[in-house]
Amino acid sequence: MLNAKWVQHPGFYIREELEARGWSQRDLAYILGCPEQAVNLIITGKRGISPEMAKALGEAFDVPAEFFANLQKAYDLSRAREPDPGVSSRAKLQRVYPVREMIKRGWIEDSDPVMLEAQIAKFFEVPHMREVPYLAHAAKKNNYEEKEIPPEQLAWLFRVRQIAKSVPVPKYSEQALHRALPKLKQLLLEPKEIRHAPRILMECGVRFILVEILPQSKIDGVCLWLDENSPVIGMSLRYDRIDNFWFLFRHEIEHVLKKHGHESEIIDVELEGKRASSDSSLPEEEVIANVAAADFCVPKDEIESFILRKQPFFSERDVLAFARHIHVHPGIAVGQIHAWTKRYDLLRKHLVRVRQFVLPGSIVDGWGQVAPISL
């Protein structure tokens, strides 16, 4: 950093050069073609050197114009006020986490550097900033870094966990969750019936949290456990579609039923296409959850039979009749037809929005709402 005590105004060096050449200020004014007063203001440090003047002085003294421009730049920097101490701190955090968005969403409060760092540490459930994932400089990586969970997804995950801890539910019952599946199945016919799904899940002891997605995180859902008997399902509603909601909802339920995520959170990112299939390259728990979710939406034997009979032509009338036959909304049938045939252009008008129905009965953070909890 420049020391203001030894950085002189460019006029100091011009005066020295004039003395070395035996020139007066009037001589320099004549050479530059400007009033003598203008030269005097520069030499006495009362006026800076403009880019135009730097070029003219360069010609006069036969040196590069950058020499005078750099003298002025160094002087200006030496006299500039020191920046707010929070600049460095905020920059360090923002380089890794979407801190501005987290403040905007009410997850943390904008404050001085010390308090901001204290909030970040508490948000990520660590005692010191040096232990915050992706911000630590220890030789050993944090567990989340080893699993390569991007910071944006990690922040979303911790918000789900944070909210879940404040939500009271009955004791979790695996048997109750199994018994709830037929009840949930009955909700697939009408979009507005989705409003009952969060309540049914919570009655089984499963905390259900909706947190709006953070920019660029592409996260769809998570299954985690607060302890051995406290499962949590978090969803982002990244796609506001009836087919996507029910597939992901049932997918996460299967993770809970199979006790996936006990040791480490199961994070579902971009759950579509191959990631939503039974492809053998996927992790075993994902295949299990995908198969259960697909069969819940449309039984495998039904969809196989329908596609075998109708492809390559799927008329709207046939799809609507098929949806009535299996007692689901047409959008759910269309979603599974897309998954099986990869014909994602078919009858997309039936992929209706459902967020308006699911938000009112859920624990929500985002979409203009802030969950009523604090650090």
Image (cartoon, helix red, strand yellow):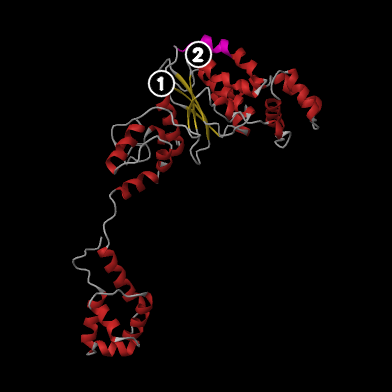
- Secondary structure predominantly adopted by residues drawn in magenta: helix
Q: Quadrant of residue 114?
A: top left
What x and y, as percent, mark residue 39? 28, 82
Q: Residues within 10 Å of mark 1 (few under 14, many from 20)?
A: some
- Element at label 2: helix
Task: Tell me: residue 195, above or below residue 219.
Answer: above
Magenta region, residue range: 171-180
Apparent side of residue 101 relative to residue 358 in the rendered image (left or right)? left
The residue identified by callout 1 is 226
| Amino acid marked by disc 2 | Glu
The residue identified by callout 2 is 203
Instruction: Write the residue at 76% across / 25% down.
Output: 320
Instruction: Write the residue at 65% across / 20% down.
Output: 188
Apparent side of residue 341 relative to residue 367 in the rendered image (left or right)? right
Does the magenta-highlighted stretch encompass residue 258? no
Please say whether residue 138 is visible from this viewpoint. no
Task: Tell me: residue 81, above or below residue 13.
Answer: above
Does the magenta-highlighted stretch encompass residue 179? yes
Earlier in the chain: of badge 1 and badge 2, it is: 2
1 vs 2, front mark: 2
Please say whether residue 341 is visible from this viewpoint. yes
Residue pushed farthest left? 5
Apparent side of residue 6 relative to residue 343 in the rendered image (left or right)? left
What x and y, as percent, mark residue 313? 81, 32
Could you tell me how far apart the alpha carbons at marks 1 and 2 are, in whole angstroms?
Answer: 17 Å
Q: Residues within 10 Å of mark 2 (few under 14, many from 20)?
A: some
What x and y, as percent, mark residue 368? 48, 35
Instruction: Write the residue at 35% across / 79% down.
Output: 53
Residue 302, label in figure: none
Q: Quadrant of residue 16?
A: bottom left
Apparent side of residue 226 relative to residue 84 in the rendered image (left or right)? right
- Element at label 1: loop
